[in-house]
Image (cartoon, rainbow, N blue to C red):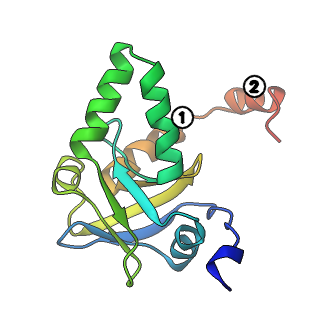
């Protein structure tokens, strides 16, 4: 299909296993590769706002964040912006379906030569280490029946 006619795919749903190699490149499953290749601009900005989760932003989404940071100048937004700039860099999916992480990002988040989990939220690919996954999994197990009932009352199906 010619690039001009190529349609953007929906992001993959679910959490997937992947691996970072000894150079900090993350090999994406085929469905993530297809999603990223379907974007009109192939460039991504790979960073972390919180120093726990690596985030692969399509450039169009990162530009929205830049506009947000231009108008929100409180302490938390300044911290998030600083983290993003310190740890981030532009990248592209390579021919083998990998995206490289900056040296600082992979060291800070311990994403070198290990299994990782990846998922999409708000159009952004999230990459978490196995240790971070275990932490978040334990927290997610704290969801109670009452908590889920509140979510359903708020409109969750």
Tell me if residue 112 comes above or below residue 65 in the rendering: below
Coordinates of residue 55 in the picture (x, y in percent): 41, 50
Q: Which mark is residue 142?
A: 1
Determine contact: label 2, label 1, CB under 8 Å.
Answer: no
Q: Secondary structure at mark 1?
A: loop
Residue 19 disc label: none
- Determine which residue is flagged by label 2: 150
Label 2 to label 1: alpha-carbon separation: 14 Å
Q: Nearer the viewer, residue 26 or 143?
A: 26
The answer to whether 139 appears left or right of 112 in the picture is: right
User: In terms of image quadrants, where is residue 155?
Assistant: top right
Residue 29 horizontal/vertical position (percent) = 48, 76
Residue 61, position as x, y percentages in the image:
53, 46
Q: Which residue shows up at 24% across the image and 49% down it?
A: 109
Taking the image as shown, residue 102 lies to the left or right of residue 14, namely left
Of callouts 2 and 1, the N-terminal one: 1
Is residue 51 in view? no
Q: Quadrant of the C terminus?
A: top right
Q: Residues within 10 Å of mark 1 (few under 14, many from 20)?
A: few
x 34%, y 30%: residue:
80
Give the position of the N terminus as an image quadrant.
Answer: bottom right
Where residue 129 sits in the image (x, y, percent)? 32, 55
Q: How many marks?
A: 2
Q: Is residue 84 above or below residue 153?
A: below
Residue 136 visible (yes or no): yes
Q: Residue furthest front?
A: 4
In depth, the one of 33 and 71 nearer the eye is 71
In the shown orientation, is residue 87 left or right of residue 127? left
Residue drawn where x is 62% and y is 61% of the image? 11
């Amino acid at each position: 299909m010619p690039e001009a006619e190529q349609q953007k795919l929906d992001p993959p749903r679910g959490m997937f296993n992947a691996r970072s190699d000894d150079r900090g490149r993350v090999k994406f499953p085929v469905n993530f590769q297809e999603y990223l290749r379907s974007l009109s601009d192939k460039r991504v900005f790979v960073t972390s706002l919180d120093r726990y989760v690596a985030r692969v932003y399509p450039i169009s989404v990162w530009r929205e964040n830049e506009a947000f940071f231009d108008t929100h100048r409180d302490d938390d937004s300044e911290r998030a912006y600083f983290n993003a700039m310190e740890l981030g860099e532009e990248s592209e999916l390579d021919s083998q379906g990998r995206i490289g992480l900056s040296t600082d990002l992979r060291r800070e988040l311990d994403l070198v030569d290990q299994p990782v989990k990846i998922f999409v939220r708000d159009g952004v690919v999230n990459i978490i280490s196995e240790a971070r996954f275990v932490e978040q999994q334990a927290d997610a197990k704290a969801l109670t029946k009452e908590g889920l009932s509140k979510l359903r009352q708020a409109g969750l199906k």
